[in-house]
Image (cartoon, rainbow, N blue to C red):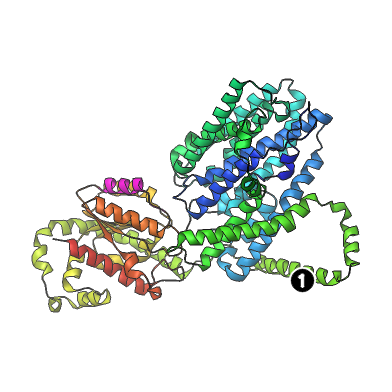
């Protein structure tokens, strides 16, 4: 992520003719566009499914600004002060980063200890800017919004930027010293950018996007496009006195790139193969065009993207990006946001802006301009002021508590997160479900062959049922017809961790149930799962779908799921009870619309049934406990019995 450096943009574009600075306010507008995309995506992914693309925009801006300033320094002084560059970067980035890491670690040590797993590795790799590679091995998918999100996940982009800062002064020096024509440097940088994009396409794995999403090599093309633009389009050598035709070309290119970028914010899914096989690269190229047109003094794009709001947000975009995830994750762990997503989103944004403003005023700005060489002198002067000892003591106590609590978290860090009772249950049931599925698949054929006898057998009285069946019926609140129908109905169930949690109960009531569940599964994965089940001959005439816990379901995804199952099968889709996530209501509306659209799709209203029954759920308010699983299974059995002939 670009670090929104006010100092960089204020020193940018010193005209050689006019001998004065030009502050490109439009860069604040670009940063605002990028950070809004990221924030909206994290708050409401379906509203702006490509909002995560704000990060490559930051990369492009950062690559351009850093490279341009180094080139300008070389052109002005015939040298580059590498140590001065490093000092400025550290003063700009480290104070807020360290504050965020310490504060977040202290908070989870006190209030969310389940997030302490791998905390030492997380903190150390962030401080040395290697966290993106640590995340590839130890982190979850950037697009898994439900299963124990880390408040540090978003810092992967800062590590890529840090690696860039470490080597880039030497790369620029080499290009300037050994290449007489800067056009050759442009060609080299753009060529390496293409190689990076090709690597992303080749290494893309739909089952695990972590390698290409977090990898420095597969994401570097965005920064390289920015650096190439700085060599090709150095702002201090661009003339504001251009012809009207050239102005129209610049404005047209800028407007088209801006509009297409916004369109792609709404349409480019972060889990689609096309995103990694060229889509993100071309998005970044357009971002480079936008940066170039805003930087050119002969274009009107700078004025278009300049206003007080953009200036305010753009200057603080580093802090906004830095603090957003901890605020969201900590807030959503305490508040069930599902029933009032808009209100809670506004509260979260307000909290993010409050924390950011405090950081900007009291940490980022003071530390960025502070001369650390006079630290001892300033401390002595401060202590001589009236009341200074009290202030110093208070500050010392706060710092000591912060470091102390963080140290406790380091000491007590588990090697890996200890599995909760729910996780142990899901793991156990996942194993037993695989064994049960083989028997269920055989039983499905026998049940299908005996379908002609069902009408007579459904009418059996409760008293004529076996003792075991009577016990099962009472346990799951079923009458004789409902249990008999369930036992005689072969079904295939596809879903997420909620289905896995219930799989043991489901296969008790539906002995002919083949269950395919996966932790973190989202709607886009279901058509492929359905296809695999059909190829193995395990797709029954009745299909249970339990998808919507982990993210939004779009209209296209719902249609793809229904079409994959086919029009001749009966589909029972369980709606979502996810009061802790903003997508709950949206998912349920989509399931209801899908049921109204297709005659063979039936909605099972788990949300309406379970609402208000907190005792049915474990602490996450989403996964049913033993009592909740009884009611969950009962609702499925009753719903299927109602529609059976």
Q: Residue 414, image x and y in percent? A: 59, 65
| Image quarter of residue 640 | bottom left
| Residue 581 appears in view | no
State the residue in front, 301 or 481.
301
State the residue in front, 474 or 616.
616
Q: Residue 129, image x and y in percent? A: 67, 48
Counting the numbered discs, the total is 1
Q: Which residues are magenta?
A: 552-565
User: Quadrant location of the C terminus?
Assistant: bottom left
Residue in the image at 67% along x and 35% along y: 64
| Image quarter of residue 504 | bottom left
Give above or below for 479 relative to 373: below
User: Quadrant location of the N terminus?
Assistant: top right
Q: Residue 522, image x and y in percent? A: 40, 52
Q: Main secondary structure of the magenta part?
A: helix
| Residue 615 appears in view | yes
Give above or below for 80 relative to 266: above
State the residue in front, 78 or 408.
78
Residue in the image at 54% along x and 32% along y: 255
Give above or below for 356 relative to 290: below
Q: Is residue 144 left or right of residue 526?
A: right
Q: Residue 198, image x and y in percent? A: 53, 32
Q: Callout 1: 10 Å neighbours few (<14), some, many (20+)?
A: few
Q: Is residue 363 left or right of residue 487?
A: right
Residue in the image at 55% along x and 51% along y: 39
- Find out whether residue 51 is within the magenta segment: no
Q: Is residue 645 left or right of residue 80?
A: left
Q: Which residue is mark 1?
A: 397
Residue in the image at 63% along x and 24% along y: 187
Element assignment for label 1: helix
């Amino acid at each position: 992520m670009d670090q929104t450096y006010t100092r960089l943009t204020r020193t940018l574009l010193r005209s050689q003719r006019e001998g004065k600075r030009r502050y490109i306010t439009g860069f604040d507008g670009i940063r605002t566009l990028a950070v809004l995309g990221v924030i909206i995506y994290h708050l409401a992914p379906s509203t702006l499914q490509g909002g995560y693309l704000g990060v490559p925009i930051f990369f492009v801006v950062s690559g351009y600004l850093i490279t341009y300033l180094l080139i300008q320094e070389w052109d002005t002084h015939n040298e580059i002060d590498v140590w001065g560059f490093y000092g400025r970067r550290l003063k700009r980035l480290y104070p807020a980063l360290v504050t965020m890491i310490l504060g977040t670690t202290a908070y989870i040590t006190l209030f969310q200890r389940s997030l302490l797993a791998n905390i030492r590795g997380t903190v150390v790799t962030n401080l040395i800017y290697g966290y993106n590679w640590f995340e590839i091995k130890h982190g979850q998918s950037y697009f898994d919004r439900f299963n124990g999100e880390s408040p540090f996940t978003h810092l992967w982009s800062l590590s890529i930027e840090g690696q860039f800062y470490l080597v880039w002064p030497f790369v620029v020096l080499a290009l300037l010293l050994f290449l007489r024509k800067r056009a050759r440097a442009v060609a080299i940088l753009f060529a390496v950018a293409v190689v990076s994009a090709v690597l992303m396409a080749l290494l893309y794995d739909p089952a695990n996007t972590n390698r290409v999403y977090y990898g420095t090599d597969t994401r570097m093309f965005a920064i390289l496009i920015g650096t190439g633009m700085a060599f090709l389009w150095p702002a201090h050598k661009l003339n504001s006195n251009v012809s009207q035709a050239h102005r129209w070309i610049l404005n047209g290119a800028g407007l088209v790139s801006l509009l297409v970028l916004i369109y792609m914010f709404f349409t480019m899914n972060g889990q689609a193969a096309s995103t990694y096989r060229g889509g993100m690269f071309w998005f970044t190229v357009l971002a480079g065009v936008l940066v170039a047109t805003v930087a050119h003094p002969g274009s009107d794009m700078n004025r278009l993207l300049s206003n007080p709001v953009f200036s305010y947000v753009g200057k603080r975009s580093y802090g906004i990006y830095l603090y957003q995830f901890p605020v969201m994750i900590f807030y959503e762990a305490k508040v069930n946001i599902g029933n009032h997503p808009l209100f809670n989103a506004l509260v979260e944004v307000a909290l993010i802006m409050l924390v950011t403003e405090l950081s900007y005023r009291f940490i980022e700005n003071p530390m960025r301009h502070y001369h650390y060489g006079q630290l001892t002198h300033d401390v002595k002067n401060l202590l001589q002021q009236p009341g200074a000892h009290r202030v110093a003591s208070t500050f010392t106590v706060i710092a000591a508590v912060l470091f102390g609590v963080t140290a406790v978290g380091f000491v007590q860090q588990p090697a890996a997160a200890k599995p909760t009772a729910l996780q142990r249950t899901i793991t156990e049931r996942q194993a037993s479900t695989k064994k049960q599925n083989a028997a269920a698949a055989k039983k499905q054929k026998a049940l299908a062959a005996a379908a002609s006898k069902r009408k007579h057998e459904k009418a059996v009285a409760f008293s004529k049922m076996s003792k075991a069946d009577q016990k099962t019926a009472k346990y799951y609140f079923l009458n004789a017809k409902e249990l008999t129908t369930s036992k005689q109905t072969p079904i295939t169930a596809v879903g997420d961790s909620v289905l896995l949690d219930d799989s043991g109960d489901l296969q008790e009531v539906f002995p002919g149930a083949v269950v395919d569940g996966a932790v973190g599964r989202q709607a886009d994965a279901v058509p492929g799962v359905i296809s695999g089940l059909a190829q193995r001959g395990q797709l029954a005439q009745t299909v249970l779908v339990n998808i919507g816990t982990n993210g939004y379901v779009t209209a296209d995804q719902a249609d793809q799921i229904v079409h994959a199952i086919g029009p001749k099968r009966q589909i029972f889709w369980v709606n979502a009870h996810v009061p802790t996530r903003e997508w709950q209501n949206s998912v349920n509306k989509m399931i209801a619309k899908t049921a109204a659209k297709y005659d063979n799709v039936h909605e099972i209203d788990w949300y309406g049934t379970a609402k208000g029954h907190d005792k049915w759920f474990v602490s996450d308010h989403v996964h049913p406990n033993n009592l909740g699983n009884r009611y969950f299974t009962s609702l499925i059995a009753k719903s299927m019995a109602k529609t059976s002939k």
